[in-house]
């Protein structure tokens, strides 16, 4: 284990312990003795500030070597969905004329209703069939849909 790894162990506790010792040694040599005869706010501030400053300095002076993570494989969702697979509406769902929240709302489908994607998608937006008539099409956010078999 290197010195840097040792100092950084336990969120830097060894570095701050060493900083406290360094602060005590310097305070004993560089401040008047009568400052340390009884506990005071000045003494606490000196010890706390010195420990923080020297600990931060030690951690900054001896940084850990960074390990570059391997690039994560980007998994692309399929461009088309399995058309005809039923989905249940999780919460009341706005069906829109186009993909996106800025598009005009066509209707609202109640939670629990079943919709069927056509297979066309635009990001998280799916073109779905809703209602009993097959010509009823609209864009819905897939975030509000669950597979019909899900509880």
Image (cartoon, grey):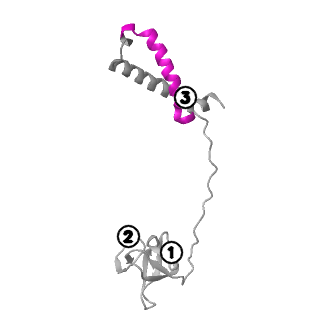
Give the label, 3 or 2, closer to the camera: 3
As for residue 10 lying within the magenta part, the answer is: yes
| Viewer-proximal residue among 73 and 89 | 89
Q: Which span is picked out in magenta?
A: 9-34
Question: Which residue is the site of mark 3?
Answer: 14
Q: Earlier in the sequence, mark 3 or mark 1?
A: 3
Extreme-left residue of the structure: 41
Contact, CB < 8 Å: mark 3 with mark 2? no
Q: Say if 71 sits above or below 136 in the image.
A: above
Counting from the top left corner in percent of width and height, residue 54 is at 48, 23
Check disc 2 and report its element: helix, strand or loop: loop
Q: Please give the label number shown on residue 101.
A: 2
Question: Which residue is the site of mark 1?
Answer: 121
Q: Say if 12 sits above or below 149 in the image.
A: above
Task: Please say whether residue 86 is visible from this viewpoint.
Answer: yes
Main secondary structure along the magenta-highlighted residues: helix
Give the label, 3 or 1, closer to the camera: 3
Q: Say if 80 sits above or below 49 in the image.
A: below
Examine the image and state in which quarter residue 96 appears. bottom left
How far apart are the two marked residues, 3 and 2, measured between alpha carbons? 53 Å
Counting from the top left corner in percent of width and height, residue 92 is at 37, 76
Q: Earlier in the sequence, mark 3 or mark 2?
A: 3
């Amino acid at each position: 284990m290197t010195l840097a790894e040792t100092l950084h162990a336990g969120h830097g506790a060894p570095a701050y312990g060493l900083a406290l010792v360094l602060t005590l040694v310097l305070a004993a040599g560089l401040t008047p003795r009568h400052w340390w005869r009884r506990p005071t706010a000045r003494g606490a501030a000196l010890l706390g500030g010195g420990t923080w400053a020297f600990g931060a300095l030690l951690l900054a002076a001896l940084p850990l070597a960074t390990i570059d993570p391997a690039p994560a494989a980007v998994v692309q969702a399929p461009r088309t969905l399995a058309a005809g697979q039923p989905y249940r509406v999780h919460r009341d769902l706005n069906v829109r004329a186009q993909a996106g929240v800025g598009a005009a709302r066509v209707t609202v489908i109640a939670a629990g209703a079943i919709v069927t994607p056509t297979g066309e998608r635009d990001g998280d937006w799916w073109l779905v069939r809703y209602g009993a008539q097959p010509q009823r099409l609209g864009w819905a956010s897939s975030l509000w849909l669950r597979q019909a078999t899900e509880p």
